[in-house]
Amino acid sequence: MNSTPEFPSLRVTRPELAVFVSGITSMGLEILAGRMVAPEFGSSIYTWGSIIGVFLAALSLGYYRGGKQATQASNETLVRVFVATAAYIAGVIFLGDLFLQSTASLPLPSRFASLPAVTLLFGPPTYLLGYVSPYAAELSGQSEVGAASGHVYAVGTVGSILGAFATTYLLIPSLSVTDIGLVFGLLSVGTALALARPNIGQEAAVWSVGIVVILLVAATTGGIGLDSRGTTVYHTQTAYQELRVSDADGVRTLYLDGQPHSAMDLSDPTRHVFDYTSYFHAPFLFSDDIDRVLFVGGGGFTGPRVFLETYPNVTVDVVELDPEVVAVSKEYFGVEESDRLNIYTMDGRQYLRETNETYDLIILDAYRKDKVPFELTTVEFMQLTSDRLDDNGILFANVISAPSGPASKFYRAEYKTMREVYPQVYSFPTAGSVVVQNIEVVATKNDTLVTRAELQARNQRRDIGIDLAAELTSYRNSTPTDDVPVLRDDRAPVDSLLDPMVGQRYVIQRTNETNRTETDRSATARNAAAQNAAAPR
């Protein structure tokens, strides 16, 4: 007689469900941690190293403690683990911003600045989730320890894979940080109830309802925090960064990962709100033949918008990596494509590699204080920009760094790298001191040195739409570079060069408001003395 073959049951057991959800939640929280921490501490390699290290340490400790107590495992203990995890996630959503701002003031070396916040915000729930795997192995009913452990960790890993992909490709592009936290909190509560059914105790029911209420309130209100950026007009998580548009005192500002990137006077859209954008006109003093301009990095399109208004014969191309930034610039900053303004949504280096266009001026405006794409800093990239410029073309780079001192390493390395390709390189610090600021670097293919006096004379003779007499006083045509490397594709230690800037004030001078500066919130929090100091003038 032929026997009927037996197939594995497709029914998911309660231990398997617990392990699967713990994998989803732990990996999802790890990716979410990067988005929550970035606006306050940046998204450097040190921040991500702290996040990965804390999650691994917390899981390991949870595995160890859970293994020691596995003989006491039951469905009820798994229910308590998920209820406690959901409760902590609710607290993270509700108080996370306030906690991040508070821990930013701790006197720690810059590369470790994010470690306390990551540990205290995400260590406990990850530690709790670490209990699930050894508990599930104990409850699996398998007599062989190896088979039980292998099955449990395989299921948990599948959950982690799903959590990583779902959070990266679905949740972050679609939902805010608080909404994503709500998803994981509700998932934990739902799992707890699924494990407890059909006999859901009164205690578990009361806790579950209470936690759901807190999660919904936090997601609705956005949590508690100190936000001095004005009225939020639009806020989202893109595939690349947190994006916020805020209005304050008649000025609309675009924030990327918590840092001001572009600003527009709502009553006078072409006014330079941030003083450093006035320097964008400086190339017109180095050359009197600029008709075609490329911006690498769009933001709020401050520069392109002013160029189109000021120079009727100029055509502007803009390359912006983040499609949401382009959409926001059109919706909230009045940007419209035309015969004179072309927008390309792609990587700047890829565009330069693929285009056949030649430009008179390339403006590199894709750097941030703590997040610089290394591929846009190297000798190979600088050579690519030179290849796309005409014989008298100019490269203009908006570099965020200090002009001297320990925090100047990135600026000086970039200056040295440009000198490998361009015969003349000039720089213009915008804040007049050693604080972290916008330093405008001009590199020319023309090897004739242009002096400060000549630039001032040209400023008097030429009508470039703005008087740069004051800006030109910060002129430099040399800088010490012996202690910094030339950046190359195979070795560009950008994170190490940026590290000394963490914890330093980032000052953006405002035009027509000489007694005000826009100061990076996280730096202010880390330096209490700087909060009370007079703003540079």
Image (tube, helix red, strand yellow):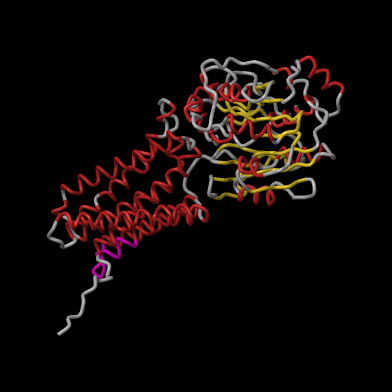
Write the residue at 27% across / 60% down.
204
Left or right: 523 with respect to 517?
A: left
Tell me which corner region of the image, top left, top right, bottom left or bottom right, holds residue 246. Answer: top right
Picture coordinates of residue 219, whole percent (x, y): 47, 54
Write the residue at 65% across / 40% down.
352
Camera-nearest residue between 358 and 433:
358
Q: Which residues are magenta?
A: 190-202
Which image quarter holds the N terminus? bottom left
Left or right: 137 with respect to 531?
A: left
- Tally of numbered discs: 0
Tell me which corner region of the image, top left, top right, bottom left or bottom right, holds residue 195. Answer: bottom left
Q: Is residue 293 above or below residue 209?
A: above
Camera-nearest residue between 287 and 195:
287
Picture coordinates of residue 281, whole percent (x, y): 76, 30
Which image quarter holds the C terminus? top right
Q: Is residue 295 above or below residue 281?
A: below
For the stretch drawn in magenta, the main secondary structure is helix
Left or right: 90 with respect to 358?
A: left
Residue 265: in magenta span = no
Tell me which corner region of the image, top left, top right, bottom left or bottom right, holds residue 261. Answer: top right
Most extreme residue toward the bottom is: 1
Picture coordinates of residue 304, whole percent (x, y): 73, 40
Residue 191: in magenta span = yes
Write the residue at 42% across / 44% down.
33
